[in-house]
Amino acid sequence: MSAGLRRGAGGAVLVALPLAFLGLFFVWPVVAIMARGLFSHGSLDLGPVGDAFRDPALRHVAWFTVWQATLSTIATLAVALPATAVLSRFRFAGRGLVIAGLTMPFVLPTVVVATAFRGLGIDGSLTAILLAHAFFNVAVVVRVVGAAWVGLDPRAEDAARTLGAGPVRTFTAVTLPALRPAIAAAASIVFLFCFTSFGVILILGGPRFATLETEIYRATAQLLDLRTAAALSVIQLLAVAIVLLVAGRAAGRSRRVSRHGDTGRTIAGVREWAVAVLAMAPAAALVGWPLLGLVRRSFAHGAAGYSNLTTTPVGASGSGLHALGTSVEIAIVAATLATGLGLALATAITRPTRTRGRPRFFTRLTESLAVLPLGVSAVTVGFGFLIVFDTPPFDLRTSWWIIPIAHALVALPFVVRATVPTLRSVDPHQREAAALLGAPPARVWREIDARVAARAAVVAAGFAFAISLGEFGATLFIVRPETTTAPVAIFRFLSRPGATNVDQAMALATLLACVTGIVALAGERLMPRRRTV
Amino acid sequence: MRASRITPVVLLVVTVLVGVSACSSGSSGSASATKTVTLVSHDSFAVSKPVLRAFTRETGWKVRVLKNGDAGAALNQVILTKDAPLGDAFFGVDNTFLSRALDANVFARYHAKGTDAIPSALRLDPTDHATTIDFGDVCVNVDKKWASSTFQVLPKTLEDLADPKYRNLLVVENPATSSPGLAFVAATVAHFGDKWLDYWDRLRANGVKVVDGWEQAYNGEFSGAAGSKGTRPFVVSYASSPPAEVYFADPQPSVAPTVSLDATCFRQVEFAGVLRGAAHPEGARKLIDFMLTQRFQRDMPLTMFVDPAIPNTPLPAVFQKFATVPADPFTLSPSEIGRHRASWIKDWTAHVLR
């Protein structure tokens, strides 16, 4: 009896805490800034939304936004899935390094890698946008799908093979369905990143391309036209809601797959090596080429770019290295916040419930709400922060905490999205069996859920860290002298002419990528290995 | 029933979280012995540490600087937060956005010490809300390497840039997202009047390239920037870019690798003001006064690459040697820019981008 009560109470905390966070730091500011645009003379005026819908130019912008994000997601999956297969199915020397390398783009400012793409002579085209989006997002697929793939029980595939299915049929009939929830989760994250992408569209697409995100930025930050911005935000939210609905359907009912910890084996024979290398090649080339270009450029004048990072530029509050330290500090706090809240929410969403039906709607809604921050413009959230947190003791606008909180907000959707499919795949019978044997709920969670979720949680925490390290869009509006992060410092170096500034920007970007790589590598080491559940 | 047991816990956690943050923000302000004045600005604001220390020594006020994105975004944030200002003073609204700041009434009236020394051509707010601090010229810059390797004659005027012999050479910034981009459009309006869009049609036919911001234009597309892989030898930048190229090179060359074209320049004037509703208005007033003193004025060229508004301020050597101040730049009144800014950008976008 008391166990049941405790379990209910625990569940409520698991949901309430993350929801309070989202409500306070996301829903409130976004609603407040949109209300400024949509309320005129004290009454709600949805006229601008209607106008926006009727405006053919804006309709085109909305359409292009969805279109480019869809194509970008497909391109990313096409490049990343073969690599993911190799990285999850096989163990080989340097595997961790490859994964670390693929994660590096995630933190790089677009301005910094734009040169490499410009070298291909495709800038100002849709191709440039798609390639750049794939470059930045390969890691999402490799990590999220990889976490599920590694844990897949190979015995099902073996059985299919024994029953006479060829490799293709085995893949489509056994492997793919089991991976579907993870692929849908990764695809929806990639879609949302591309949907709200800013730098890639402006820098590689050029001013000819406009998306909802760039138009909201222009309306808010340049024109101070909050009516148009609010109308566009409504359209953005609607589009995101539809996408989440579709992704939810595509994920299908998750299957109960028994998990085997790490199931990778070594590559055997020349043929397997050849297949593995071929499958890895597109992702390796796409990510490796710009990274190498960056490193080369950072050494344009020997190590000067690096050694100058220890000195404080005139007018700055600290050196480039200091900014890197600040970034790491903030990223640790943001990742802790996002992982804690995200895991709590994911656990709550996937908790087995005795009464069917009732919680389905609520959990779906919660899950969607948790992902929403990825689909809303950084400038909307940033300006929203400014107008709601303006009275003490809630005056967070000049506080150190505002940056890690904003970063955690961006990372939270990722944590939820990356861990929910894994947690869902836990066989409820295992939990029931444990409970029957007398284990209290906390122990059941620790012994069953936590073990299964450990890999996904490490991946999620690593990504939350990387997201915070690389976040720029929201940071630039709320950055304070004490919180100058590395991406902001890079941007400031590049906003001045002269060789020493460019050198330092490239050197700092290289170091930022290295920190990310090292953390990803450490995450791989931390990964739980062989275990039978 | 269950929920009621939980709510206090949640409230407690949220309160602690917010409390911690409130403390950390409060400690920098009230707890310190000296008084602190907060300056809100854009991302390009910079001042040397010794100069700020001198201000603290002379007045007892410490300065905290909040940089809030580019010039447009920073001003918009000031306007949005005017009921509860982020700080006490604002630096960084220029003549292309001055009317928006004045219409929104963000500044308190203040006649700063030193204002009377500013030339009247730069004093664009007679109501004494916005104080002129500096100016700069947005001009087309040319890569000298290009000129010497192709034996071409440098262009001189805006008309020259539309000449077919300079085809596919110019890169400009989008006026919708870039402050120099908007200034260059203003230059064409000032020069061509009603026919300014025809000029842009000709530039478009002549292969002008548009990018979104100065960083991409200068570091990415312009061939004259240090270490650039860019291919375009003409770029819309500043009259102070050639001295900056010299100053930030190691070792510094004896001649600037680039040159700015005096007949293509639009004058940007930059203002500061005391924010209405400031918590420390007297600190803000002292800070504005300080910005017009020689110590601050002579620091600006090498920190923000702008020209001091107070005449006869000694200039650093690289400025004396490599910077030119155009004698007769294009200008437009802030109110005219304010009235037409939105329609210019709209028409420009339709003609040049679509």
Image (tube, coloured by chain):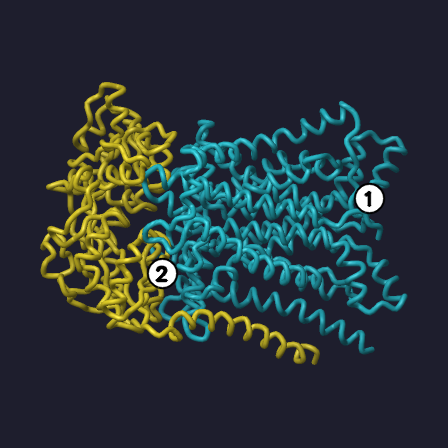
Give the camera-side residue of A137 and B88: B88
Q: Amino acid at mark 1?
A: Asp
Q: Which residue is mark 1?
A: A153
In the displayed structure image, the side of residue B48 where residue A3 appears, left or right: right
Which chain's colour is yellow?
Answer: B
What is the drawing colour of chain A? cyan
| Residue B339 visible to an observer of this rendering | no
Q: Is residue A340 above or below residue B44?
A: below
Quarter of the image for the C terminus of chain B: give it.
top left
Residue A427 x, y percent position in the rendering? 82, 55
Question: Residue at horizontal 54%, vertical 47%?
Answer: A193
As helix, strand or loop, the secondary structure at mark 2 comes to strand
Mark 1, Cα crowd under 10 Å, few <14 / some 14-19 / many 20+, is: some
Mark 2, Cα crowd under 10 Å, few <14 / some 14-19 / many 20+, is: many
Give the camera-side residue of A66 and A283: A283
Cα separation between marks 2 and 1: 54 Å
Give the camera-side residue of A68 and B108: B108
Q: Is residue A78 above or below residue A20?
A: above
As helix, strand or loop, the secondary structure at mark 1 comes to loop
Q: Nearer the viewer, mark 2 or mark 1?
A: 2
